[in-house]
Image (cartoon, helix red, strand yellow):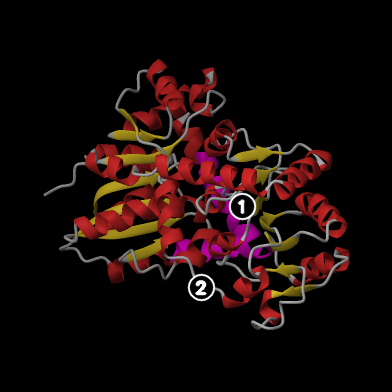
């Protein structure tokens, strides 16, 4: 099976090579990986000790970021190598100043693995949440390089725990320690003889608290929000299915203002949004502090601001729940406001726990969304109490980074 796995990766690499002539993401991946060895030769200091962090994409980077930054503060004698697999992570964070070297991770084929580890020469490796490259993990173990997995979640339907997935389960035995988010993950691993596990939680709680403390001041958004007496719904990372129910409600309820930050901000989608709004709207890129006061909807047509925008709302709606799954609920909950999302939340521990605590709500359809919004709008005190629950939930689950670092012995 190991040979078949490696053969499949060679096929995948070849398919990316072909796709790169037609697909931008594939082209970025191919070119990025092609430059990796050169970056390592140029930037790796052979006399320094590097801790290697690997994130598949941007979401995993955000989970690993608190650990990287705490490690950098407490152990300045170490340098940090950060790798990405996806362009959506690398292209956004390639200039991140919290790492000393940043590059793409080459495909998990034996030759490329050995070449990468020879050039990178890490003293420790940290994989974030969902990265299980069998050849990398096996070679790290063979070389005696301490290797950790952080903020992981395991479910019985994953390949590791299938009858035919035993060969892939070997990857889990390559980690010196697995830091998981919940007790269920630890119990599942224990059933298969994996006991070098610590239940520490999710580093995203620490990350959203840090983002809250460093939130950008956005004068135009603040002017749009006004004095807060008119309820403001902030809808983040929305997809067309989310926007159907959002616009229907917004158009029929003049007492509520809306900030919408769609997941896709290309011109055609923005024009479509504007065509479906029946009340005055403006794009953030077209505003100044005065041009927003007579508008009812503010359309966020740039990336990187959403985590700072939630602070201005009284209610948050998180997109994705009518598609593959919801986006980051914690970014909004940290500001002490109720959080609403669609029905596809089962894979997200924090969403389930927010619902159980009373700080979040799932709506299966438009009727349920209307009912929930009407209740929150009509009862300000109840809305504030719900927001306080969301805020408390985030704070009670923080401190994860400290927990991990205490159990991750660094070389002195």
The residue at 52%/41% (across/down) is: 389
Say which of marks 2 and 1 sits in front: 2
Q: Which mark is residue 217?
A: 2
Left or right relative to 261: residue 374: right
| Contact check, label 2 and label 1, Cβ < 8 Å | no
Left or right relative to 212: residue 261: right
Q: Which mark is residue 15?
A: 1
> Could you say which is closer to the camera, residue 27 or residue 57?
57
Q: Which residues fall within the magenta stretch?
A: 7-34
- Kindly report the secondary structure that dominates the magenta region of the rendered protein: helix
Q: Which mark is residue 65?
A: none
Residue 343 in picture, x, y percent from top left: 71, 37
Q: Is tag 2's residue or tag 1's residue first in the polypeptide sequence?
A: 1
Q: Relative to 410, say whether 95 is above or below.
A: below
Magenta span contains residue 219? no
Question: In which quarter of the view is residue 372 placed?
Answer: top right
> Could you say which is closer to the camera, residue 407 or residue 339?
339
């Amino acid at each position: 099976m190991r040979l078949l796995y490696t053969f499949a990766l060679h096929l995948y690499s070849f398919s990316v090579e072909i796709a790169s002539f037609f697909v931008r993401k594939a082209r970025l991946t191919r070119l990025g990986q092609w430059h990796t060895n050169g970056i390592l030769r140029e930037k790796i200091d052979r006399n320094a000790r590097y801790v290697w962090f690997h994130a598949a994409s941007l979401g995993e980077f955000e989970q690993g970021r608190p650990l990287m930054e705490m490690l950098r503060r407490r152990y300045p004698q170490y340098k940090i190598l950060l790798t990405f697999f996806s362009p959506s992570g690398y292209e956004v964070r390639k200039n991140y100043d919290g790492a000393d070297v940043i590059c793409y991770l080459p495909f998990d084929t034996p030759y490329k693995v050995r070449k990468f580890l020879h050039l990178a020469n890490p003293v420790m490796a940290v994989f974030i949440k969902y990265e299980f490259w069998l050849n990398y993990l096996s070679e790290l173990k063979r070389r005696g390089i301490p290797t950790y997995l952080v903020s992981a979640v395991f479910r019985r339907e994953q390949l590791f725990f299938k009858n035919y997935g035993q060969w892939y389960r070997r990857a889990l035995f390559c980690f010196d320690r697995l830091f998981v988010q919940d007790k269920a993950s630890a119990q599942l691993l224990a059933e298969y003889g994996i006991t070098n596990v610590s239940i520490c939680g999710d580093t995203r709680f620490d990350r959203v608290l840090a983002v809250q403390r460093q939130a950008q001041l956005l004068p135009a958004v603040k002017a749009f929000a006004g004095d807060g007496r008119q309820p403001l719904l902030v809808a983040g990372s929305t997809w067309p299915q989310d926007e159907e129910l959002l616009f229907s409600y917004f158009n029929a309820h003049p007492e509520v203002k809306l900030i919408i930050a769609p997941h896709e901000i290309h011109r055609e989608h923005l024009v479509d949004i504007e065509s479906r709004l029946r009340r005055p709207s403006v794009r953030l890129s077209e505003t100044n502090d005065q041009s927003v006061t007579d508008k009812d909807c503010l359309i966020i047509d740039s990336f990187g601001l959403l985590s700072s925008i939630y602070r201005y709302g009284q209610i948050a709606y998180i997109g994705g729940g009518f598609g593959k799954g919801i986006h980051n609920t914690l970014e909004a909950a940290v500001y002490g406001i109720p959080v609403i999302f669609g029905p596809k939340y089962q894979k997200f521990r924090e969403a389930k726990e927010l619902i159980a605590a009373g700080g979040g709500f799932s709506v299966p359809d438009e009727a349920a969304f209307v009912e929930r919004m009407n209740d929150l709008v009509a009862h300000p005190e109840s809305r504030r109490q719900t927001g306080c629950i969301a805020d408390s939930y985030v704070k009670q689950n923080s401190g994860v980074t400290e927990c991990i670092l205490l159990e991750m012995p660094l070389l002195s």
